[in-house]
Image (spheres, grey):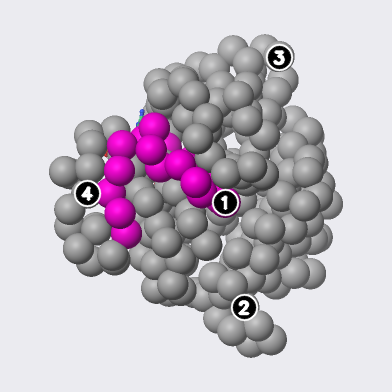
Amino acid sequence: MKIGIIGAGNIGGNLTRRLTALGHDVSVANSRGPHSLKELADETGATPVRAEEAARGAEIAVVTVPLKAVPDLPSGLFDEAADGLVVIDTGNYYPRQRDGRIAGIEDEGLTESRWTERQIGHPVVKAFNGTYAQDLLDRHRPAGDPERMALPVAGDDEAAKRKVRDLIEELGFDTVDAGGIDDSWRQQPGTPVYGLRGSVDAVTRALAEAPPERPEEFRG
Ligand SMILES: NC(=O)c1ccc[n+]([C@@H]2O[C@H](COP(=O)([O-])OP(=O)(O)OC[C@H]3O[C@@H](n4cnc5c(N)ncnc54)[C@H](OP(=O)(O)O)[C@@H]3O)[C@@H](O)[C@H]2O)c1
């Protein structure tokens, strides 16, 4: 499958590694330009591109940049994407350590992914946001393995969500349907499922136990 990855840091880099290993045709971009991605490209066989080219012809794009950088992404990022492009958002809001205060999230009460959708002008499926980047490399397991972890996946479009769940299952993780984007506060930073290494049952339980208030340490 043709997959475009925007952001080549902890998560984008490791998704590039695993998705190329599975035989996918991956284009990857960062803020500094393709020349700065030579090492990752040589290692993985991914194609380094500019951010505006990453989703060109792709079936799935992944936006995996710090939340504060989302408004700086080029406009029309997905204009040349294939029909039915599915965009995965891995983002988290860290107002105190990294992102600064974002009014849409704090004052309007938007979920982090709903805010991101509005910035990029495209619906998203929220996935990987609570997964340690290193676990993508170290903790994938075949289906049925008792140690296989489950990841929550939220999105409003059922077909898009199914496509993302299939990809994650191919990457070596089970998935749990975490509802729509308005429900995705249940998997944001500080919730019981955030960073949880657990089974389908454990993830399902943690999503159900999430309190609706934004934790104090994740307020700007
Ligand atoms: N680290 C984790 O384990 C983890 C786990 C789950 C979710 N997340 C979330 O996923 C997101 C990414 O995290 P990360 O740890 O992978 O970040 P990171 O290591 O800091 O990497 C960020 C990447 O985004 C790129 N970038 C920044 N601004 C950009 C722009 N305007 N256009 C194109 N690319 C841009 C950076 O490129 P340059 O280097 O060229 O600036 C870099 O490749 C965050 O919201 C984070 O909270 C992280």
Residue wearing tag 2: 148
Which secondary structure lies at badge 4? Answer: helix
Residue at figure coordinates x 79%, y 61% from the top left: 204
Q: Earlier in the sequence, mark 3 or mark 4?
A: 4
Q: Is residue 217 magenta?
A: no
Local packing at callout 1 (Cα closer than 10 Å; few below 14, some 14-19, many 20+) is some
Give the foreground label among 1 and 2.
1
Q: Earlier in the sequence, mark 4 or mark 2?
A: 4
- 19 sits left or right of 28 in the view: right
Q: CA distance from mark 1 to mark 3?
A: 32 Å
Range covered by the magenta-colored residues: 46-65
Q: Which mark is residue 37?
A: 4
Q: Nearer the viewer, residue 207 or 82?
A: 82
Marked residue nearer the N-terminal end (1 or 3): 1
- Mark nearest the camera among 4 and 1 is 1
Relative to 33, is 197 on the left or the right? right
Q: Is the shortest distance between ligand 1 and the CB of mark 4 under 8 Å? A: no
Dot 4 amino acid type: Leu
Which amino acid type corresponds to the residue marked 3 in the rendered image? Glu
Measure the alpha-carbon separation of dots 3 and 2: 37 Å
Q: Badge 1 is on which residue?
A: 59
Position of residue 52 in the picture relative to residue 110 (left or right): left
